[in-house]
Image: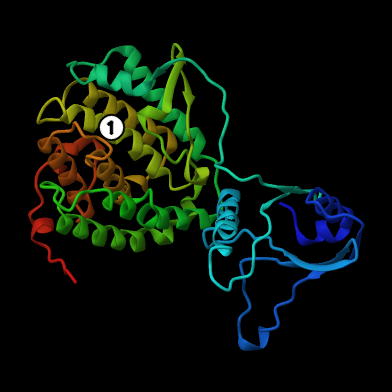
Amino acid sequence: MPTQESLFAHPNNILNYLRDRGHTNITLKNVEPLRDKSHHLGKEFGFGDPIFVEFESSGTSHAIVIRTMRANQFGHSRRSDRMGSLSDAYDTYNQTPMHIRALDVGTIDAHGHLYPMPPGEPFLVTEFIPGKIYAHDIEECSTHKTASPSHKKRAAILARYLVTLHAQKRDRLQHIRCLRDTLGSGEGIFGISDGYSPEDPVVTPSRLERIEIAVLRWRWRLRHLSHRAARTHGDFHPFNIVFAHNDTPVILDCSRGAEGEPADDVVALSVNYLFFSLQNGEHFTGALRELWTVFWETYLDESKDTEITHLVPPFFAWRILVLACPTWYPKTSSATRERLVQVAENMLTGAHFDPFKIDDLLGPNQVFESSNTSHL
């Protein structure tokens, strides 16, 4: 990551940048940190490292500030966070009355070179690997009474993939952030809740409120488990897995910094065995129940993770709210949506999760249904 020092050590990079932006006959007069004069007021921390630059161009004096942002635990730990924050500043500064003007936005590489970012929407280019999305496997199994050896093999392969991935440990702060984002991000529980219609007959506003309050309690139950921070996928559902050559998986679209709580990945895939099964019947049986068992057995046996089954409730709640949301899955029946949300409610109120006794969680939760909510 570039630092202030890289710019101070290579002032010619600033000169080159200014020339690229149309300035001529440049004399660089001063480059220094823009010191905060308010330390005596008690404020010691800030998000950025602003650099003051004074120069002359064709006889006219100019003063600008090059603003960079440090990685920190307040939602800026990823490069994409800092890019998003600074591009948002560029988009809004000049639209705000009496605000300082934003002149440019770009990136600084490790050698101090400044690259302006052109206007427009960002894009990403990836390779293409032909293959079969794993969701097709699950759909195929949803009407079968037993799973084929090939389908069982694939479920075990995916469990082992996660075991290997999760063995890579990460900074504890990434676990705390994962819990926070699971609740409060636009892609998390609060954002998905806002995707429901106020007139939804199954997942009503009061029901969503109870779920959100319950999940908030779970954040504080799990917050001390930051030692679990690991390399993750972040969105390990069956539409992000392709089997390209026989039983060799290709993984798509890792998300959310690819760091956090391993339970999220395990839940993101396994809940789909339940989801696809319930769409074809009231009970969780048949081939998909077998794949669920193979997946959980393999992961638990090989990861030696004795904590994971005790902390899955908020992640099941999150993934189930996605699956039960008509915005995402408009063809899912009301009956299936009801059964799914009941699973989340049972877990959130403390019902023990045993992956091999999942039927215990498939009924209504009277305690959850009768809990009070407050409407302001």
What residue is pinned by disc 1?
Answer: 272
Residue 193, percent from left and from top: 27, 52
The one of 179 and 293 positioned closer to us in this rendering: 179
The C terminus, quarter of image: bottom left
Residue 52 seen in the current view: no
Relative to 150, does residue 168 appear above or below in the rendering?
below
Q: Quadrant of residue 214?
A: bottom left
Neighbour tally class for label 1: few under 14, some 14-19, many 20 plus, Cα within 10 Å: many
Which residue is drawn at the image coordinates 48% and 27% (left, top)? 251
Residue 131, percent from left and from top: 44, 15
> Residue farthest to the front?
59
Relative to 73, does residue 309 appear above or below in the rendering?
above
Residue 368, percent from left and from top: 13, 57
Q: What residue type is labelled 1?
A: Asn
Q: Is residue 311 left or right of residue 113?
A: left
The one of 337 and 216 positioned closer to us in this rendering: 337
Which residue is drawn at the image coordinates 67% and 83% (left, top)? 39
